[in-house]
Image: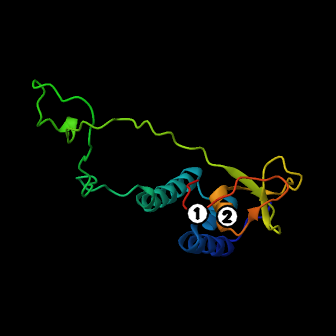
Amino acid sequence: MQKTPARRRKASNWKVYVCLLICFPYGLFLMWRTTRWHLAVKGLVTACFVALTLAVLLPLTSPPDRLPGGVHMVNAERDVEVFGPELPEALDTNYIGYGTVSISNGPVFTEEEIAEPTYVYANDNGQFYHRLDCEYVQWYSKKYTLPVAYYSGYGPCEKCQPPVYTPGMGG
């Protein structure tokens, strides 16, 4: 087996040095593949580059430091009206957990019933709105509330006789 001349070995070592400085991953690859350095030297050089890489990259990946104090909401005080019986005298009215208490003799729930909206169906290219059971309602017909159908320009169908909307009557 013929030995590599010292001059050639030295030239290849310079290539490894340059690659380690310019592009260290490739330089490490060349060092492990082509040089005849002692295993401890190769391990030490690799450990130094790993430590240097971690020292550079770890501060970039840490979350930013939080400033003390947190979040302060402006005008976020409690403003609640509680309807019901008066609070007993024994309760401290200055306790912030109670919120603002006002006295009212009005009812908590109204007896007025909320009307369910009336739905009708209309086709995009049609002029009329229909009941669900009308023969002109198709799978592609759109569902509208009665006022929306009226204000969209649809009129009541003469065949199925859906409810007629008059402005001001509610939903």
Query: Horizontal placement of 41 versus 120: left or right?
Result: left
> With respect to residue 143, does 92 lie above or below?
above
Quarter of the image holding residue 126? bottom right
Q: Position of residue 117 (x, y in %)?
A: 62, 48
Report the residue at 41% width, 55% height from top.
62
Q: Position of residue 22 (x, y in %)?
A: 56, 74
Report the residue at 20% width, 42% height from top.
100
Which residue was labeled with disc 2?
Answer: 150
Quarter of the image holding residue 3? bottom right
> With respect to residue 90, does 146 lie above or below?
below
Q: Amino acid at mark 1?
A: Pro
Tell me how far mark 1 sits from mark 2, CA to CA.
9 Å
Other residues around mark 2 within 10 Å, as few (<14) / some (14–19) / many (≥20): some
Other residues around mark 1 within 10 Å, as few (<14) / some (14–19) / many (≥20): few
Which of the labelled discs sits on residue 26, or is there none? none
Q: Secondary structure at mark 1?
A: loop
Residue 35 seen in the figure = no
Which of the labelled discs sits on residue 167, or is there none? 1
Position of the N terminus by quadrant = bottom right
Q: Nearer the viewer, residue 134 or 79?
A: 134
- The answer to the question of whether label 1 and label 2 lie on touching residues, with beta carbons closer than 8 A, is yes
